Image (cartoon, grey):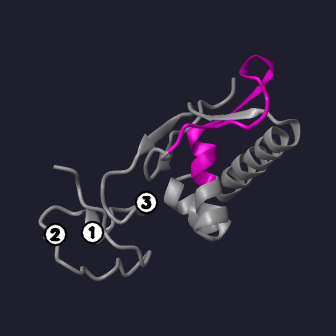
């Protein structure tokens, strides 16, 4: 019996949930679904330019697992672009990280995520990931 899949940590939900090509009637359009963990892996590796090892650590998965996720995501994106299919972003076994700078270590959290850290006008970036803290919504 296979091992149950492990939740993947994502920083946040993407700002959009679909991309639709122009010029095709919706009833003739195919759909390709990109899961939230695939989208997060693509964001970390291709947009943030993290190494696969660093991206895997941030998502709290192994590097080989991240490599498989990125490979499948690239195939899905290429297929959607080539065939003119709509790209939906949804699903997957994920959990969203708490507000902070965006990274989380296996042992403990980012110091910017700890209680008692007061926001400043120009807070220094996180010494580990070099990102600025995201403020919690009121």
Q: Nearer the viewer, mark 3 or mark 2?
A: 2
Residue 124 vs residue 8: left or right?
Answer: left
Residue numbers of the magenta segment: 16-41
Residue 119 visible within the image:
yes
Which one is earlier in the sequence, the residue at label 1 or at label 3?
3
Residue at screen point 48% across, 47% down = 15
Q: Which of the two residues, 24 or 86, is positioned nearer the viewer here?
A: 24
Residue 34 horizontal/vertical position (percent)? 66, 37
Label 2: which secondary element: loop
Question: What numbered label is drawn on residue 112?
Answer: 1
Q: Nearer the viewer, mark 1 or mark 3?
A: 1
**Residue closest to the far right:** 82
Residue 94 vs residue 51: left or right?
Answer: left
Q: Quadrant of the N terminus?
A: top right
CA distance for labels 1 and 2: 7 Å
Residue 8 horizontal/vertical position (percent)? 52, 44
Question: What numbered label is drawn on residue 117?
Answer: 2
């Amino acid at each position: 019996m296979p091992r149950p899949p492990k939740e993947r940590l994502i920083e946040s939900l993407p700002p959009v949930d679909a991309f639709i090509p122009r010029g095709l009637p919706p009833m003739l359009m195919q759909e390709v679904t990109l899961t939230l963990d695939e989208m997060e892996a693509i964001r970390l590796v291709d947009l943030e330019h993290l190494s696969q090892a660093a991206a895997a650590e941030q998502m709290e998965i192994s590097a080989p697992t991240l490599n498989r996720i990125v490979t499948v995501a690239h195939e899905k994106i290429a297929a959607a672009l080539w065939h003119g299919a709509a790209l939906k972003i949804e699903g997957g076994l994920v959990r969203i990280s708490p507000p902070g700078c965006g990274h989380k270590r296996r042992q403990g959290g980012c110091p910017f995520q700890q209680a008692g850290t007061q926001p400043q006008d120009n807070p220094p970036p996180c010494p580990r990931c070099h990102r600025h803290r995201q403020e919690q919504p009121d």
